[in-house]
Structures are given as C-alpha cells and as structure tokens.
Amino acid sequence: MGTDADEHRYFEGMAVVHVLGGLDESDGRVFRSHLLECSHCRAKVGELRALAHDLADVERDERRMRAAKAIETKRRELADEDDEEAEPPPAPPGFRYYPRLMILIGVVLLMGLAVWNFTLRGSLSSQQEYVDNLGDAAEVSRLGTDIEPDLHMADVEASIQRRDDQLVLLVTELPDDAVHGVYQLDADGGVVDAYPIRSTQGRIYLLVSLHRDARELVVTQPKASRGLSEQPTGPRVLEARVPAQRE
C-alpha cells in the first residue's frame, strides 16, 4: 500500500461501482474530483459505460429477433391449419441466417458477461484489500506505540503509531491532491524505501511496512510526482525517529 499503482487500483475499483451507480455521496464526490485530474480513470469509466451500452444493445437485438421468430412460427402454424397442402410461405430474405446470427450474438454476449464478471471480481478484490488495510491500520492505531514527529511546516498536524514492523501515518492540513514523498532512511541517512502518495482532501492516511533497517521516516513535497530521487527532495513536511525493530 502507498504506491501510485495501489491508489489507481483503488480508484479503478471505484470506477465499476460508479458506473453501476453504487457509490454513496461521499465516495462519489471524491471519485468525481479524482476524474477531473486523472485521464486514465476517465478513460476507464468511458470503457465501462461503452461496454454496458453494448451489452444492452445486444440484449435488445436478441429480444427483437426472438419476437420476430416467434411471430413467423405462429404465422406458419396458422397457414398450415388453413391449408395443410399449401406450400409454406417463403422465408424472409436472410431469415435462414438467423440461427447463425443468434449463435454469434450469444457468443458476444457471453464474452461481454465474462469481461464484466472479471471486472466486478477485480473491483471486489480491490475493495476488499482496501478494507483489510483500513482494518490493519485501525489495529495499529489502537494498540501501537506513539512516535512523536518533528513537524517542519506551519499548520500541519500529524500522528504516528507503530506496532512491530507496521506504522500508521496520519498527516492533515496538507495541500489537497498534492503528491508527497515518503522515505525510510537507515542509520547512515541512506534511503531503504521510498514511494509517492497523493493527499486526499488535504490529508494522508497510510499504513507503512517498515524496512528492518529503517531508523527515520521523512515526508516531503517533491516537485516531481514520479520517479522519486535516491535522496529526499523538496520541502520537508515532517521527520520521525524510528527505533530499531526487536529481533
């Protein structure tokens, strides 16, 4: 957790629920705000809506063809009752191709449903992972030991709790929708882990898996949103000493 990829998996999961109309007011507001900034997620929503529209078209065409076939069958039965010796009426042009067309439509429909099912399962998996992470973070916050951060920016508030090799970081009063760098440093100041995270509604709430050599946690506001450098860059938001983990 804590990477741009993880964040996008979360918002991609929200995209499915958004298209299905299942987001509540709060999540819907957050997701719509994210769509204004993220072309990838806008494209994802467009693809999902197009797929839903295509499936609806396929189902509608299939119902029309079934109705036409039922009418034609009934017409033939009535004609046979009136004159058993009469030749059956010629089939409409192209009617003999209907079975093949029905099979093709069925295959397309099944493929669409398979894709839809895969997308929904991916969404549920992402949502479950997100919920599990929130549960782990709540457990660390409740049972963990407080670590006092050294704040470098006015008005910013932060709290850190640690339990074993996990740490929960909460920082508020940050610029909204801004990318921050989270660095773990060893005793010599070298970076042992680093990743970007974007603030949401002016805050960061992050469950961190501590590297065994980590002795310091640093949060910065780098200028670049991707490709963090080998050393912390940009204004520092906070620093916190991390005691060595027990063997």
Image (cartoon, helix red, strand yellow):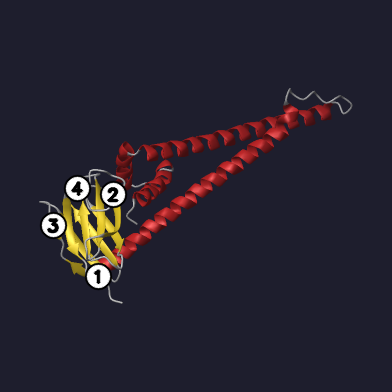
> Between disc 4 and disc 3, whose residue precedes?
3
Residue type indicated by callout 3: Leu
Which amino acid type is shown beneath numbered disc 2? Leu
Report the front residue among 56 and 136: 136
* Vertical arrangement, residue 188 with respect to residue 81, above or below: below
Considering only vertical position in the picture, is 110 above or below 1?
above
Residue 238 on image: x %, y %? 17, 56
What residue is disc 2 on? 228
Number of the front mark, 3 or 2: 2
Task: Give the amino acid at mark 4.
Answer: Gly
Mark 4 or 3, closer to the camera: 4
Return the mark for residue 188. Answer: none
Q: CA distance from mark 3 to mark 1?
A: 20 Å
Where residue 144 is drawn, which disc sits there?
1
Q: Amino acid at mark 1?
A: Gly
Mark 3 highlights which residue?
151
Mark positioned earlier in the residue sequence (1 or 2): 1
Q: Residues within 10 Å of mark 3 (few under 14, many from 20)?
A: some
Residue that appears at 16% across and 49% down = 235
Residue drawn at 15 percent across, 56 percent down: 157
